[in-house]
Amino acid sequence: MNPVRESIAQLAPGYFAAVMGTGIVSIGLHDVGVEPLSIAMMWIAAVLYLVLWVMYVWRAIAYPHQVVADLRNPEIAFAFFTVVAATDVLGVRLAKEGLIGIAAPLFLLAAALWFVFGYVLPWQVLMTRDGKPILARANGTWFIWAVASQSLAVGMAQLRPHADAVAAPWVGLLAVLAWSVGAILYAAMAMLVLLRVVHFGVTPVQFDPAYWVAMGALAIAVVAGAGIVETGRTPMVDAVRPLIAATVVIFWVFCLWLIPLLIGAGFWRHLVHRVPLRYVPTLWSMVFPIGMFAVASISLGTADELPAAGAVGRVALVVAVLVWAVVFIAMLHRAFRTVWDTLHPRSVAVSA
């Protein structure tokens, strides 16, 4: 099998996190007025989105057994929810650019995928019985289920101003539903992952960048909640507005508390235990939370008049841009090497 086909066969289920990470950094740059770089990253996210759909469809047709195996693997199955979140994040960025005609179908697609994946994937994972304990394989990717729910809430909040009088109450209902489900799922996933750590432990190799999603899932809940609070009046939104407004600051503070813990775990993994720091697709699961925290902080600083949060957000945004650039270059290098090795098989044989 040539390197390109092998890469397709082994394509990580969570690669749409690349769109999520690129899209959210673009949104953050837009929010602080850095338009040229923001627009460039928006189009990079759009290209990545289309390319990844082609690759995933290719994989589903050419290697269906690998796809089914991934869907039933508790360690990676929840990463498929990145498709939902990436669709919503790209839609939000396009909507901010005034391209609601493209964004609205993306939001509807994300809603459909969310409903399908939200029932099919957990059933596949939790009903798996292969002789290995499910709890022992809970990890950071499980939080992506909550991220997908919150991303839909963000998308519906963006769509609400463009909905007519008939559709607006339903859009508001779906936004509140997605936010509420996401918050409850976060609590459930946090409990399961914590139980895994307590009962089975986590080795330095197992503590990969996907655990950063534990922070990103709360950060996107802040943005989703703020969007719902600021959206137009509908019966469902009016009923929960005070509750959601009271929770977003608490969620943000907990995000802030988690960051030193995650950084310390990174030092423990790479410096203490010498796990090599090299490009892996799960690095995008670190880019998105950092960018999401930046956007949440900037949003909180503006909407709730908390200048300290806004200042933290701007610093986090600079870090997010730098981390994105490093990971993006590393991904391009991996892609170039794969194509090069396919076109020059002799060099591969010689080096082997």
Image (tube, grey):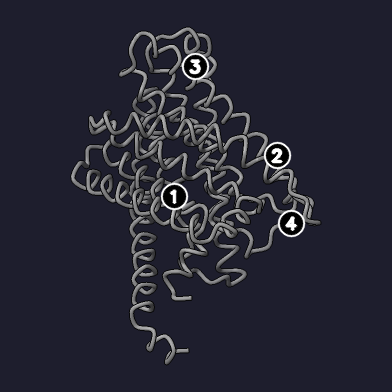
Please state which of the two labelled residues, at mark 3 or mark 2, is closer to the viewer: 3
Residue under the point 65% across and 40% down: 122
Query: What residue lies at 38% left-to-right and 77% top-to-bottom?
Result: 342
Q: CA distance from mark 3 to mark 4?
A: 40 Å
Residue 99 in the image, given as x and y percentages of width and height: 24, 32
Q: Which residue, given by chain and number where applicable, does mark 3 sit on?
A: 173
The residue under label 2 is: 191
The residue where tag 1 is placed is 16
Q: Residue 335's mark?
A: none
Residue in front for this viewpoint, 42 or 246: 42
Horizontal and vertical percent for residue 106? 37, 34
Which mark's residue is nearer the viewer, 3 or 4? 3
From this view, report whether residue 66 is shown above or below residue 348. above
Q: Is residue 50 above or below residue 243?
A: below
70 sits left or right of 334 in the view: right
Between the C-alphas of marks 2 and 4, the distance is 14 Å
